Amino acid sequence: MTTPTRKPLFLPPTLLLVGVAVLFTASCSKTEKVQADAAARTSDSSTVAVAKATIEDLSRDLVLTAEFRPYQEVDLMAKVSGYVKVINVDAGDRVKEGQVLAILEIPEMADDRARAEAAIDRSQAEVARAKDQIQQAQSSHDFAHLTFTRLSDATKQKPGLIAQQDIDDAHNKDMVAEAQLSAARSNLAAAEEQVHVNTAELQKIKTLFDYTSVTAPFTGVITKRYADKGSMIQAGTSSNSQAMPLVRLSENSLLRLILPVPESAVPTVHIGQQVQVRVPTMNRDFPGKVQRFSDKVNVATRTMDTEVDVMNGDLVLIPGMYAEVHLTLDRRNQAITIPVSAVDLGSDAASAQVVVITPDNHVENRKVQLGLETATKVEVKSGLKEGELVVTGNRSGLQPGQEVRPKVTTMSPSAPE
């Protein structure tokens, strides 16, 4: 049995060339894809986020919250007890200093005044009578003294002419008349003094009567009314009394804020310091001024009470509203600033290092001296110039001299602390 002979496989030359071309094309395509991926990775890794060093006015602020209070506020009490005869104001009324707010009625005070006036008339009549008594005593004294003088002279000229008993009687009458004159003068002085006493008593009653008109001690707004017409008001002369006020008066044209300034910020506070006051409910800012402070740190809270005055001439601000006060602790004008994210701190707070991108797009490590720092920006005292680029992104893979592609990013304005 004969085994068939297997013929060798023979491919035409054209088909062989096509196969080689296919294999070469596939190989080239795969190589180009690998190179493209590598180029893309290289391009991505060399792009860094940078920011420009700019010149700005930098400030470090402290935001404190407080509520508006009237510059001065008082519950108006009556000096004397009485019934409310007239009340001219109500809550919300604006009043001026000296304006009559209410009038009290005190019937018995009119009787007291009439009695005091009658006492003055009586004492003045006593003065007139005392003056008449002085004139009478003066006449009696003059006659008695003249009689005694004549008898004495006659006795000297002709001794024994007049009995000694008559001379002694004349001398005695002279002395009595002189004593009566002195008593009359004393009575006149006492009567005049009584006039002064009665006049003072009448003036006291008039003063108390003036208190029946309750007036405004300063210009302000009536924020509360306690009494109505006919109400019985007790005299508010003692702190222990339960006297009811008439109205509450507040000076709202000037408001004050009492801020608890932390101990660390106390050295930066000074009288006359301008501050920015923001009222969130109104979405408005108002100027304020540090007007006074306690000059003592509270040992319990480690804060110092600081008062800021805010003008409120149009009365748009209401006492009790909350306000945010931006207290400037430190400020730098025309300072070179960079983002805080671009800084790597050094051995101390003033020294640091940044990664700078040179004009030919190469990486350079540079030491800088820092100054004032806010929440987003920091001052560079030395080591950088305006317009230079610093890296704000990840710097761990960057090497000095490495060529990169910088991409400038914009930062939001520095926010107060």
Image (cartoon, rainbow, N blue to C red):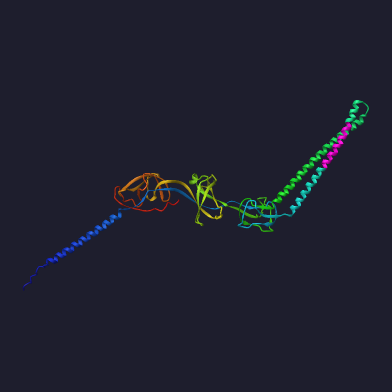
- Residue 196, picture quadrant: top right
Residue 356 location, x and y as percent? Answer: 34, 48
Q: Tell me which secondary structure the magenta stretch mostly adopts.
A: helix
Q: Residue at x 92, y 31 (%)?
A: 166
Task: Tell me if 276 is positioned left or right of 239 in this view.
Answer: left
Q: Residue at x 77, y 50 (%)?
A: 115
The answer to whether any part of residue 148 appears in the image is yes
Quadrant location of the N terminus? bottom left
Task: Tell me if 139 is positioned left or right of 334 in this view.
Answer: right
The answer to whether any part of residue 305 appears in the image is no
In the rendered image, the residue lying farthest to the bottom is 1
- Residue 317, picture quadrant: bottom right
Front in this rendered view, residue 133 or 112: 133
Front in this rendered view, residue 23 or 247: 247
In the rendered image, the residue lying farthest to the left is 1
Front in this rendered view, residue 132 or 371: 132
- Residue 16, picture quadrant: bottom left
The magenta stretch is 129-148
Q: Residue at x 81, y 38 (%)?
A: 185
Q: How many marks?
A: 0
Task: Tell me if 77 is positioned left or right of 308 in this view.
Answer: right
